[in-house]
Amino acid sequence: MKIGPYQLDNPLIVAPMAGVTDRPFRELCLRHGAGMAVSEMMSANPDVWKTAKSLNRMVHEGESGLRSVQIAGADPRQMADAARFSVEHGAQIIDINMGCPAKKVNKRLAGSALLQYPDLVEDILKAVVSAVNVPVTLKTRTGWDTENRNCVEIAQLAEHCGIQALALHGRTKACMYKGEAEYDYIKAVKQAVSIPVIANGDIDSPEKARFVLDYTGADALMIGRPAQGRPWIFREIQHYLTTGEHLPAPSFEEVSSILLEHVQALHAFYGEYQGLRIARKHVSWYLKEQASAGDFRRTFNALEDAQEQIDALQGYFDNVA
């Protein structure tokens, strides 16, 4: 699949997830088979651009693969400024967030709240597209709620405004992440526009990936929560899509190596104080299938020293092995 002039290595994209798809996570997913990774969203409000959190999210130069940066906001001028700022700091693609269902985002009319106001959506899309000379993409949902699914209208509007690819999560804002993704609406959008359509929602196995591509006709897949603690899901899906066969599950030794590498990368990227705290949720995701890991996770989450985290993980894996 192409986004503007950029050809993806494969049709598997890491979904932008606030507090998750930082640089260490994106690099890890790319190394394990993702064709592209979208950064966690950056607020269009310039007042927060100089905070430590925002500055970490703006580190893009030197990254592997295509650098796609997601911006979120409700003011067309601010969104245009945020797009220009991101491009100046290394973004090759700008992604507009109109899918986040979080209350703190929606109360500012950003994220999926914008789906209630197509005129404002049009203003934002036009402002961002005209502000930068790189491809602009859009991530959205099927609608505000089950009584107001307007994804086809929004998709056609996006194409008219110059959006070059559309990622659609198969749920409304009101559905949050509950229930099952509704692929019929992704299929309808694919049939209504000529720009690439990326299917998102509940793609958690190679078989599900194959089904969603075939059923919706989508050009690519976007994977979010199923990759948490399982970055190798991308290579598993890509292998299955290519060969129809399953890759062997990663060995215990490989999982331990990936996890230790990930935690060390978090320490290095954020510094010890913040890095060890961010590492806690990732370790929990990696070990959630380990029945014996409950007590260890509680002990691990109480550690306040980065090296102690590494030592504890190595000790845990040695004991299990």
Image: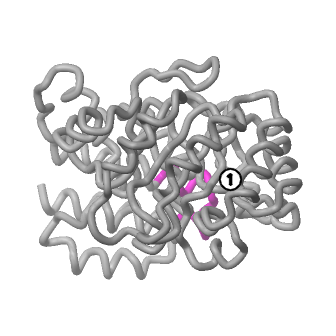
What is the quadrant of residue 10 in the picture?
top left
Residue 70, compared with residue 303, is above or below; it is above
Residue drawn 63% across and 35% down?
Answer: 159
Where is residue 66? Give x, y as percent: 59, 29
Q: Viewed as shown, does residue 292 lie left or right of 300?
A: left
Q: Pointer 1: residues within 10 angstroms few (<14), some, or many (20+)?
A: many
Question: Would residue 234 be counted in the magenta stretch?
Answer: no
What is the quadrant of residue 134 in the picture?
top right
Where is residue 284? Give x, y as percent: 33, 68
Residue drawn 53% across and 18% down?
Answer: 7
Magenta-tinted stretch: 264-275
Residue 52, compared with residue 14, is above or below; it is below
Image quadrant for the C terminus? bottom left
The residue indicated by pointer 1 is 57
Q: Provide the major secondary structure of the magenta segment.
A: helix
Q: Viewed as shown, does residue 192 lie left or right of 314?
A: right
